[in-house]
Image (spheres, rainbow, N blue to C red):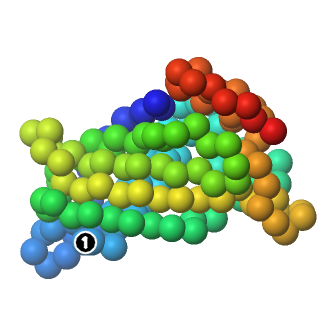
Amino acid sequence: MYIHETQLRVRYGETDQMGYLYYGNYALYYEVGRTESLRSLGFSYKGLEEIGIMLPVVHLQSEYFRPAFYDDLVTIRTRLEQLPEKSEITFVSELFNEKGKLLNRGRVTLVFYDKAQKKKTLMPQSLYDALAPYYQEKSSFM
């Protein structure tokens, strides 16, 4: 299973009047986790877009357990529970406070979309090849 961690400090503009991380901003934290996890594999959203692959979100689920507060350092743990084999990729993000307490869990599904063909497409082979070593049972692709 592929797992990546990054950290982000809660900024003042992301909080509500109580100093809590505003619930609508958690999706932005998931995006930071996804972006940095792909970057750690040698890929970027920009690079994928340059080859004509877009990644629109088709499903978002979020569970809230504890609040994050202004100036908290939040660890974003992002994982891919399964090696994607079709046009969808699902990232699970867990946000932890500095004490290691789980604050939030999100699940975001995106599709690989060929901008020129205007239709879903398979994950680029190079991304599959970068992810495959993290999974014990490698299945056939393409």
Q: Tell me if mark 1 has few (under 14), some (14-19) or many (20+) residues whose alpha carbon lies within 10 angstroms of its own.
A: some
Left or right of residue 117: residue 64: left
- Residue at image position (48%, 31%) is 2
Left or right of residue 6: residue 138: right
- Residue at image position (14%, 39%) is 100
Q: Is residue 133 above or below residue 86?
A: above
Residue toward you, 131 or 33? 131
Residue toward you, 23 or 139? 139
- Residue at image position (21%, 64%) is 64
Q: Is residue 85 above or below residue 112?
A: above
**Where does the image place residue 128, in percent across and percent down from the top left?**
69, 34
Visible residue check, residue 87? yes
Going by the numbered disc 1, the residue's amino acid type is Tyr
- Residue at image position (75%, 35%) is 141
Image quadrant in which you'd find residue 98: top left
Left or right of residue 41: residue 122: right
Q: Check disc 1 and report its element: helix, strand or loop.
A: loop
- The residue at the far bottom in this view is 17
**Where does the image place residue 131, in percent across and percent down from the top left?**
60, 30
Image quadrant in which you'd find residue 110: bottom right
Quadrant for the C terminus in the image: top right
**Where does the image place residue 107, in percent across and percent down from the top left?**
41, 57
- The residue at the far right in this view is 117
Visible residue check, residue 69? no
Residue toward you, 38 or 89? 89
**Where does the image place residue 86, in percent across and percent down from the top left?**
70, 49
Image quadrant in which you'd find residue 29: bottom left
Q: How many circles with numbers are drawn on the protein?
A: 1
User: What residue is shown with label 1?
Assistant: 22
